[in-house]
Amino acid sequence: MEKSIVFKSGIYNLSGVLHIPEKGKKPYPVVVMFHGFTGNKAESHFLFTKTARYLSSKDIGAFRFDFMGSGDSEGNFEDMTLLTEIQDGKKAIEFIMSDGLFDRNRIGILGLSMGAVTASYVAAEYRTKTLVLWSPLAYPQLIEKKILTRKLKKTLQEKGKVYPPGLGNYLGQGFFQALHTVNPLEMATLYTGNVLIIHTKDDATLPIEHSFSYFEAFHNRAIQPRLIILEEGGHTFTTELSEKTVIEETSNFLLETL
């Protein structure tokens, strides 16, 4: 069963979809899904929707939602920062914890791309049982180098926001400032649960070295992380084989660890 949800994060109403298994034993294990930069709760080629439905068929609940300023959630995209997304992620976890349908001791988090930064913070603070990272961003400050040309830097200083070519949205000063205040790899060293990382060799958006950095950060723990490297599929697993593999491998891992 799929249920549209609205929950609060600060002054904003955030939009989500809750996937509730139709069989199995309550309370269910559940995965909260954090989308990437400029993404939404469905994600590229509906990857989050497909994954959530697949998990539900395996008796695992799923909750996918739009961060503030993205998708159907309230707020302006230009006010979004990694700090606001971390706050949104915490509220999503608290919402799930308050729902009697789900086992608060069997919560997993899945983060895609920039959503992996948020996932690392929230998983460490709430000590979730399992963490899955797809094509994760390890070094947030690199986004600034990728986006801000000399001309855009000047515009940002003068106007407090910029409209990068091809993005389709403004980014505010706070977005770029937050890139230098978060450290997902440091948070990774604090996380003690189960970890699965999946990345493709041909990811042109975030090189696989980002996943290697996470793997190293997670490595000095009692529970060893798992890293799956796919030959192709790009940043969001857009080939038929990579999509099938990432969904099935993630499901198998969650069935084992939640």
Image: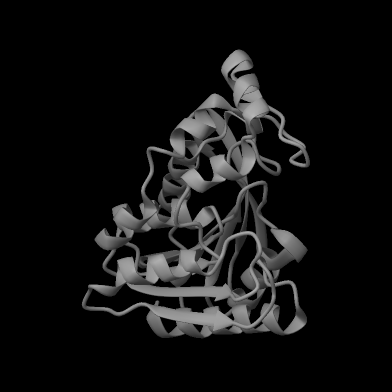
Q: Quadrant of the N terminus?
A: bottom right
Q: Quadrant of residue 243?
A: bottom right
In this picture, is 218 found above or below 172?
Answer: below
Residue 129: x %, y % from top left: 34, 69
Residue 212: x %, y % from top left: 43, 71
- Asked if residue 22 shows in the view, the reply is no
Q: Quadrant of residue 216?
A: bottom left
In this picture, is 177 found above or below 221?
Answer: above
Q: Residue at x 48, y 47 (%)?
A: 140
Q: Residue furthest front?
A: 150
Residue 103: x %, y % from top left: 39, 67
Q: Is residue 254 left or right of residue 105?
A: right
Q: Is residue 221 left or right of residue 107?
A: left
Residue 83: x %, y % from top left: 44, 38
Nearest the camera: 94 or 80?
80
Q: Residue at x 46, y 82 (%)?
A: 253
- Asked if residue 242 shows in the view, the reply is yes
